[in-house]
Image (spheres, grey):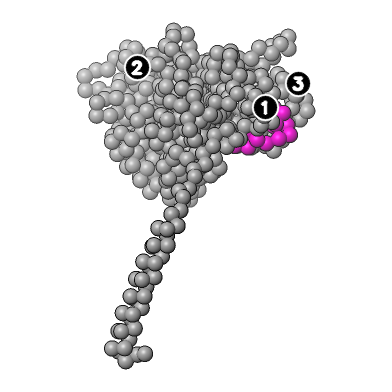
């Protein structure tokens, strides 16, 4: 995905500037719910138009718009049939009065009343019930639009006016590039990143920077070959879904993909649903859940006989909240995800709970990559026991140290932990990429060269002086199962020897110049009559 194309940059810069002007005092992390939701609604409406024409559901006469043709043919008597047909194919359906074009027409005619927006979304939710298989994907997706927020205006009419302005702004967006390519998904993704950057700490809750996502994506898809069978991909803390999409884009072209994800925050879950669909992921190929990953296992769990047959995936990626609190009650030791390790992650640090959950759902030949704080490499007690067991089971494949201040909301340095279940060699590969970054105003960035170097080194799996080291199991045992990267990769740079003779020569020269300057000042003072 090329986020920096001129067309996208021009569109998003204009959109961002106008959005900031319109949002007034509203926090960017909240305003995104309005502008991104309306972008999605427009997308759904136009996608429906394409379906109506391409599938010959309606006949469009000369000099007639698609929307007018739809309104003319889907009258009251036939409407239910049309909505049923559309929903069975698309998973959702929008009636003629609620389409994007109809909404715009009413706005331009000054006919929109405040309650129209609530009706719009109520009708959408009602129609989402028409396709039982798609209900979970579409129902309530617009629930985060707070139509009564006083920051939109102190009266209902003022709030309606603000919403009208957002609709008009979204309508100005050009969804296609100069060569006719659909760029809506890229614009949407770029805006998510912009909102994350401006939201500060809150931004880290729903967005993994694209450069980090790329590293994880390239790692877990490295040996993937195009197959007819679906590539099954899972993110247990999916945020806005950006990481899932990045992995999908790294797979060979034409590979069928099933996306699975779970997200605790409802607003962020809604964002993920929209994000995936705007990247042309069909509702049939995405299974997303709004739930607590550590409490609600994904998605099968024990069957009616109490036998746990976990769903496993070809790749698992995750950027969970770092050192989050979780309920580590003793009964969880019986949970199949954690029982093999004899200890539970501490209540104040759920990092290893996310690791074990993710690993549990990885298939025998898959690859898992997860972003974690450095502490998981060396902290003791229960975490030390879990880490030792993972090493003894030969699950940890690679540890990659990343630069500090890459993520929104935290400046701490992080690592990427790569795990596999079927590893013949008993070793762990360490990469220290912590010093390869471009310093930014608020955050550091990884260059394309730095990313390429990480992936190249990961692939070669050979020692690189002051950058990478392949450590044997014996070496790791010698370090008491401590995986702190500096124990294995020496990045110390010796300072150049000081040439004392040269230093003395420079001092002598400096003293000579100072003496000459003092003599000159003294002469000037004498001329002025000052002794």
Q: Is residue 456 above or below residue 152?
A: above
Disc nearer the start of the sequence (3/1): 3
For mark 1, does the 10 Å Cα neighbourhood hold few (<14), some (14 to 19), or many (20 or more) residues?
some
In space, the residues marked 3 and 1 are separated at their CA atoms by 28 Å
Residue 114 in view here: no
Q: Quadrant of the N terminus?
A: top left
Location of residue 273 in the rendering, given as x and y in whole percent from the top left corner: 49, 26
Q: Which mark is residue 477?
A: 1
Q: Secondary structure at mark 2?
A: helix
Instruction: Point out the stretch of residues depicted in magenta.
Output: 373-387
Q: Secondary structure at mark 1?
A: helix
Crowding near the residue tagged with mark 3, few <14, some 14–19, many ≥20 C-alpha atoms within 10 Å: few
Can residue 67 be seen here? The reply is: yes
Q: Is residue 335 above or below residue 531?
A: above
Depth check: give the residue in front, 332 or 278: 332
Q: Which mark is residue 334?
A: 3
| Viewport quadrant of the C terminus | bottom left
Earlier in the chain: of badge 3 and badge 2, it is: 2
Work out which residue is located at the far bottom of the displayed protein and give it. 529
- Pick the front one: 453 or 259: 453
Task: Kindly give the residue lying farthest to the right in the view shown.
Answer: 330
As for residue 374 lying within the magenta part, the answer is: yes
Measured Cα–Cα span from mark 2 to mark 1: 64 Å
Mark 3 vs mark 2, CA separation in Å = 52 Å
Tell me what residue is drawn at x 45 percent, y 48 percent.
Answer: 496
| Point 64% across, 14% down: residue | 310
Residue 201 is covered by the magenta coloring? no
Task: Provide residue 130's location: percent of width, then percent of height.
Answer: 50, 17
The residue mark sitting in front, 2 or 1, is 1
Residue that label 2 marks:
52
Q: Nearer the viewer, mark 3 or mark 2?
A: 3
């Amino acid at each position: 995905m090329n986020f920096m194309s001129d067309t996208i940059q021009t569109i998003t810069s204009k959109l961002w500037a106008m959005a900031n002007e319109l949002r007034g005092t509203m926090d960017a992390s909240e305003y995104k719910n309005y502008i991104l939701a309306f972008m999605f609604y427009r997308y759904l409406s136009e996608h429906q138009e394409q379906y109506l024409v391409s599938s010959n559901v309606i006949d469009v006469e000369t000099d007639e718009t698609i929307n007018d043709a739809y309104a003319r043919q889907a009258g009251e008597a036939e409407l239910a049939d049309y909505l049923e047909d559309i929903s069975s194919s698309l998973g959702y359906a929008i009636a003629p009065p609620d389409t994007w074009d109809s909404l715009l027409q009413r706005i331009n005619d000054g006919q929109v009343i405040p309650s129209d927006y609530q009706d719009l979304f109520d009708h959408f939710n009602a129609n989402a019930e028409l396709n039982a298989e798609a209900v979970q994907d579409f129902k309530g997706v617009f629930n985060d639009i707070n139509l009564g927020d006083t920051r939109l205006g102190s009266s209902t009419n003022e709030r309606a006016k603000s919403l009208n302005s957002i609709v008009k702004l979204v309508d100005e967006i050009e969804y296609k590039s100069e060569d006719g390519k659909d760029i809506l998904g890229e614009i949407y993704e770029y805006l998510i990143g912009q909102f994350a950057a401006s939201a500060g700490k809150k931004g880290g809750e729903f967005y993994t920077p694209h450069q980090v996502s790329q590293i994880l994506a390239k790692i877990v898809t490295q040996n993937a070959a195009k197959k007819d069978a679906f590539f099954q991909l899972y993110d247990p803390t999916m945020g806005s879904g950006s990481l899932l999409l990045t992995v999908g884009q790294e797979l060979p072209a034409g590979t069928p993909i099933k996306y699975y994800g779970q997200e605790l925050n409802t607003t962020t879950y809604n964002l993920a649903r929209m994000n995936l669909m705007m990247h042309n992921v069909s509702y049939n190929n995405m299974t997303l859940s709004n739930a607590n990953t550590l409490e609600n296992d994904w998605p099968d769990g024990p069957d009616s006989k109490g036998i746990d047959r976990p769903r496993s995936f070809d790749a698992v990626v995750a950027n969970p909240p770092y050192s989050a609190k979780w309920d580590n009650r003793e009964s969880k030791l019986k949970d199949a995800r954690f029982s093999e390790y004899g200890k539970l992650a501490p209540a104040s640090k759920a990092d290893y709970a996310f690791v074990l959950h993710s690993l549990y759902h990885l298939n025998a030949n898959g690859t898992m990559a997860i972003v974690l704080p450095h502490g998981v490499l060396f902290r003791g007690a229960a975490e030390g026991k879990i880490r030792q067991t993972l090493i003894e089971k030969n699950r940890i494949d690679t540890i990659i140290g990343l630069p500090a201040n890459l993520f929104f909301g935290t400046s701490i340095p992080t690592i990427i932990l790569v795990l596999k279940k079927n590893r013949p060699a008993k070793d762990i590969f360490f990469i220290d990429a912590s010093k390869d970054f471009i310093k930014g105003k608020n955050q550091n960035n990884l260059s394309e060269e730095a990313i390429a170097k990480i992936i190249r080194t990961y692939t070669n799996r050979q020692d690189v002086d002051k950058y990478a080291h392949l450590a044997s199991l014996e070496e790791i045992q010698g370090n008491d199962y401590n995986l702190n990267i500096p124990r294995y990769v020496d990045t110390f740079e010796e300072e150049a020897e000081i040439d004392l003779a040269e230093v003395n020569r420079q001092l002598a020269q400096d003293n000579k110049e100072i003496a000459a300057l003092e003599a000159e000042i003294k002469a000037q003072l004498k001329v002025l009559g000052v002794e």
